[in-house]
Image (cartoon, rainbow, N blue to C red):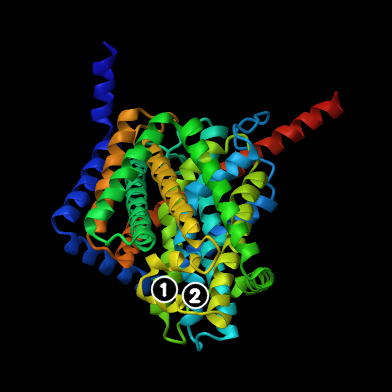
Amino acid sequence: MSRPVEQRRFTLNRVFVVSLILVAAFGTWGLIDPEGMSSTSLGFTTFMLTSIGWYWLLISTGFLILAGFLAFGPYGGVKLGDDDEEPEFSTVSWIAMLFAGGMGAGLIFWGVAEPLYHFREPPGMPGETAEAARAAFALTNLHWGLHAWSIYGICAMVIAYFTFRKKQKPLISTPIEALFPGVAGQRLGQVANVLGVFAVVFGLAGSLTMGTLQIRAGLGELSGTPLSFGMSLAIMAVMYATYMTSTAVGVDKGIKLLSNINMAVAVLMVIYIAFVGPTAFIFETLVDSFGSYLTQLPNLAFHLLPFEGLQGWTASWTLTYMIWWLAWGPFVGIFIARISRGRTIREFCAGVIIVPTLFSLFWFAVLGGAGVFIELFGGGGIAELVSQDVSRAFFIFLDFFPFGQLLGFIALFLIFIFLVTSADSGSFVLSMMTSEGQLNPPLTYKLVWGTLVAVLTVATLFSGSVEVAKAMAVTGAIPFSVVLLLQVVGFLRTIRTERGGARVHSLRASARSING
């Protein structure tokens, strides 16, 4: 008797049906006409990045400022849950899971490549100089540091607050319905949920495409296997089987175990490179780049380069990254919210923003610093390779170290597990978003969304281009940015009302105590 009811709920979920149709349509388009889908995505994102670049930078920097206010302002002691609630996961497991879900594979892909790219071709100055190296690390840290994790943090905090403190559904629409109560708010909320699904699916597919291309390049470099589209399909098939198995196991077991293993391996690998490579140079780079980043951050946070005529560079790098984090915001936000119950806002900001940022700075100082050292004082050649084939750069870089081939296979393992963790988390979050906010969504939903993400990834793989993958990753975030702004307004209005009510209650209690 219960099965027909469950089936009815499944088919009548409007957000699920509309999202499914839209994503399936894009996936079919990509399989039938991959060139058409690729060119359309590139054209759309290029236009939006160059025509309203100021808008994207202001949103991203605004999230950073807001995160600072929430951490150090009057709401820092508010707990994301009941006042007496304890965190569900240990601090180590919590940080490992949010980090692996947030950007793990991207760090490996760009760890060496991005600093060397900016070192060779910095915007507005000659390349391959000391100043170019310093600018390269400042720009890389801007793209992967506080801005990125503040976007993730705010997206997660809003959902966690309404879910665990206000006991409402963990949906993108919840803060919007609080802002616009009634039928209009419900309809606007459904649109917001669909746009959120769109942003997550495209962001995930673009990232999985880049990761698959890097795994393919690594296998080709390490084993001499010819690169082909069939090889990309085989990698994606294995990845699909792995993340669907992990998804079926659940967050508490699958994602937690994979995240802890991967974090441990990543830390050991970067420490190994730091101490067998040019150690003194690497740590000097770390200190220098950390200082440059902090001192230049106020300027870089509003840096668009209009007077130099370099809006194209800003659109291709800084703004693309900022929208990329916005694209992953609903996905990583809901996932981080799911694992952050019982944390105060201040503790949440420290764990979600400060700790991962410090690790990212360390990561780029080690890998990028060693890469710059090789260019300046070693054999060189990696920076040129980055411009030609960024997917191979990391594996060529590892050949400069003892046991380079072994490191290459370890890196392949890291990339693969990071991607599996991201896809696992993404399937879980998409299922939550389309099952009316169930914290433990049905397996059927996970299978559907995991499969659709794989189909869209395969469609993007037809292009074989990192640029197309980046365009796909940010396509869904462009319309979703308005939803994020509405979420923030709804959150601030609600938490202000709560704290105001708490103060009134406290004053009345004090008055009664005095009068009594």
Q: Is residue 437 left or right of residue 353?
A: left
- Mark 1 to mark 2 CA distance (whole Å): 7 Å
Q: Are marks 1 and 2 in contact (CB under 8 Å)?
A: yes
Residue 117 percent location from the top left of the image: 46, 75
Q: Quadrant of residue 501?
A: top right
**What residue is shown with label 2?**
116
Q: Amino acid at mark 2?
A: Leu
On residue 347, the disc is none
Dot 2, how many residues are within 10 Å of its Cα: few (below 14), some (14-19), or many (20+)? many
Q: Is residue 178 left or right of residue 226?
A: right
Quarter containing the C terminus:
top right
Q: Residue at x 33, y 62 (%)?
A: 224
Q: Residue at x 42, y 30 (%)?
A: 249
Residue 4, placed above or below residue 213? above
Residue 308, placed above or below residue 103? below
- Seen from the viewer's position, the closer of residues 342 and 452 is 452
- Seen from the viewer's position, the closer of residues 197 and 402 is 402
Secondary structure of residue under mark 2: helix
Which circle's residue, 1 or 2, is located before the other in the chain? 2
